Amino acid sequence: MNRIAATIDGLNTIVATVTKWLALLMVLVQFGIVLGRYVFGVNSIAVQESVLYMHATLFMLGAGYTLLVDKHVRVDIFYAKASRLSRRTIDLFGHVCLLMPSMAALLYWSWPSVRNSWNILEGPISVGGIEAVFLLKSLIPAFCILVMLQSLSEIIKLILRDPS
C-alpha cells in the first residue's frame, strides 16, 4: 500500500515539476504582451489566450501536488486545535465523503462536454485565438484524476499512519 501512495506522490511531484515552469513562462509572455502592445503597438489574441491556457494548466494540473504538500485551502477553525486523532478523522472524512465524491461528480458531469469538444476539435475562445479549446477542456478530467489519485494516496497514508 505504501508503494501505491509513493507512486501517486511521485506522479504528482513530476507533474508539478513540469508545470511550475509555466509560472515563469506565463510572466514572460505577459510581459511580452504588455511590451508589444504599449511600446510597439502590436497585439495578438492568440498570445493573450496563451496566458489563459498556461494559467489554467498551472492551477488544474498543480492541484494534486498542492494536496500532497498540504497547501490546499483548509478551514482551520477547529482543525488547528484538534488532537492528532481528531485531525486524522477529519482528514479521512474529508477525503472519503467530500473530496472524492465531488471530484467524481465533476468528472462525470464534465465528461460529455470534454468528449464533444474533442469530437469537433473545438476552436478558439475568441476570433484569432488558439484553436484548441478541446485541450483546455481536457484539463478538467486531468484535474479530477490527479486530485482523486492524490486523495487516494492521502487516505492510504492516513490509514497506515499510527493513530496516536
Image (cartoon, rainbow, N blue to C red):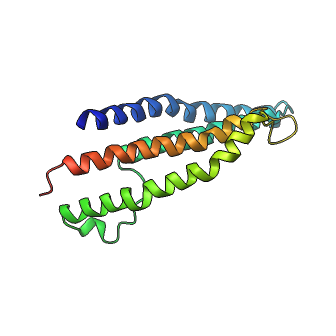
Q: Quadrant of the N terminus?
A: top left
**Residue 22 x/y as whole percent:** 57, 32
Residue 52 visible in image: no
**Residue 146 x/y as whole percent:** 47, 40
Q: Is residue 81 above or below residue 47?
A: below
The quadrant in which residue 123 appears is top right
The quadrant in which residue 36 appears is top right
Instruction: Judge from the rendering whether residue 22 lies leftward or rightward of residue 133; answer left or right.
Output: left
Q: Residue at x 38, y 48 (%)?
A: 151
Residue 47 visible in image: yes
The quadrant in which residue 55 appears is top right
Instruction: Judge from the rendering whether residue 54 lies leftward or rightward of residue 134; answer left or right.
Output: left
Q: Residue at x 53, y 30 (%)?
A: 21
Q: Residue at x 57, y 53 (%)?
A: 106
Q: Residue furthest bottom?
A: 78
Q: Residue at x 84, y 34 (%)?
A: 43
Q: Nearer the viewer, residue 68 or 32?
A: 68
Q: Residue furthest left?
A: 164
Q: Quadrant of the C terminus?
A: bottom left
Q: Is residue 139 above or below residue 11?
A: below
**Residue 96 x/y as whole percent:** 37, 57
